Amino acid sequence: MEILLYVGGILFMLVGLGVSIGLHEVGHLVPAKLFGVRVGQYMISFGPRLWSKQIGETEYGFKVLPLGGFISMSGMYPPSTTSGPAKGMFASLVQDARSANDETIADGAEKRVFYRLPVFKRIIVMLGGPVMNLLLAIMIFTILASGIGVQQASTTIAEISQCVVPAGTSQTACTPDDPAAPAADSGFQPGDVLVSLDGTDVTTFAEASAIIQSSAGRTLDVVVRRDGTDVPLSLTPAPAQRAETDANGRVVLDADEKPVMHTVGYAGITAQLEYARQPIGTGTDMAMQQAGAVAGLIVNLPVKLWDVGVSLVTGSERDPNGPLSVVGVGRIAGEVAAADAPVLNRLVVLLNLLAALNIALFVFNMVPLLPLDGGHIVVALWDGIKRAWAKLTGRRDPKPVDATRLVPLTIVVAVLLIGMGALLLVADLIRPMNLLG
């Protein structure tokens, strides 16, 4: 059964990735057709064709290598104006790109080409794919936050610690010399619902925890609801040493790089976790936060990839905040699906992974380098700037920007992307990231 669940998690992520790529290309396809551009192909994946069907002027299909997708638009670049053999490797590459581009311009459809579109329409077409991934991520995060809810501690008590374990020890069981935990000594029971502490009504465990932590050694009047009846109790939180943390949950260190400790009240109660539905805009906020995190990862990508290489060679643990290949994401999805946890919890993690994957597709495709969508947007913007400057200075309209001149740079970027993918693939197979412990 565990193997079936593991495979099911991988299939869930593969299907989700396929849908995400398919919708990305739909984001390009629909505006291109609406603006009259001739689209010859809509393909999911690359390589040899698995299946296809001609509908109108567009061939829709699937290919073998699940590494992305594409649509083939007529006249992505202006037609070539040079003839004769190209001299030099780079010149040859540029000419080959121009020849391939010329072949997409069908007879009788010379005006239905991408490069003739107004700048804003070209930007809309190229933005369509990444924006589709962003919208899909927002939808998934909204379902998670406002439909299912965000898991948080409730005011219902799940467990009562029986003793106070000495700080800084690995002790997991009580000994006869350990003092009784305040909550156990005060008569708290699992299933009790916290109603008020020290005369203050509480609706979340965070509110109750804040009162307890600020009341070390002071007796509190507590009211709990037990089997529908309010029961008064007295609780005296025991003083305990706790490392101070910042707003991001990181331990604060002093000048000697040691944790900053302070005294807090300790009761010895653990809260039940529940899914609390959030306001409808929470999903969008989560997507934007994730996008910021992915953007930060991309900015530091060379360092992160170096760390992956070091981990691969030395066998050290990989950074849990580092990049992953599709294989790594699939492996984590399989482990989540097979984990010993409630079905809803596993589904939430899988949906989070899928949403994060779409955010990664959105941010990565916005990088302003060809062959990525962001590179095509930069070309369109540069074309618009040239035309605007010509109009402002009273000059003739310049020729359309010929992006085939950037083919050598595009090939360099493509090679780097392939190298990055290969490194992450090998690392995820040989030295997988451990996120679940």
Image (cartoon, helix red, strand yellow):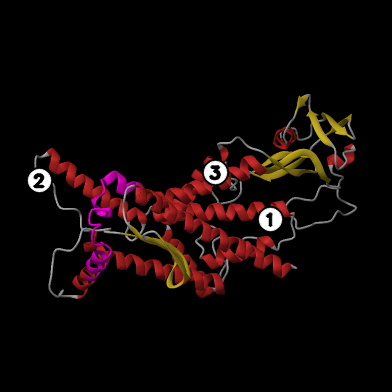
In space, the residues marked 3 and 2 are separated at their CA atoms by: 48 Å
Image coords of residue 6 (percent x, y): 67, 66
Residue indicated by mark 3 = 286
Res. 396 mark: 2
Image coords of residue 208 (percent x, y): 74, 34
Is 308 left or right of 376, judged from the image as shown?
right
Q: Are marks 3 and 2 in contact (CB under 8 Å)?
A: no
Mark 2 burial class by Cα count in 10 Å: few <14, some 14-19, many 20+? few
Residue indicated by mark 1 = 346
Most foreground residue, 100 or 212: 100
Res. 118 mark: none
Quadrant of the rendered image containing residue 145: top right
Residue under the image location 16 percent in, 74 percent down: 86
Most foreground residue, 380 or 122: 122
Instruction: Using the image, determine if residue 265 lies above or below residue 140.
Output: above
Question: Along the polypeptide, which appears first: circle 2 or circle 1?
Answer: 1
Q: Are marks 2 and 1 in contact (CB under 8 Å)?
A: no
In space, the residues marked 1 and 3 are separated at their CA atoms by: 19 Å
Q: Is residue 116 magenta?
A: yes
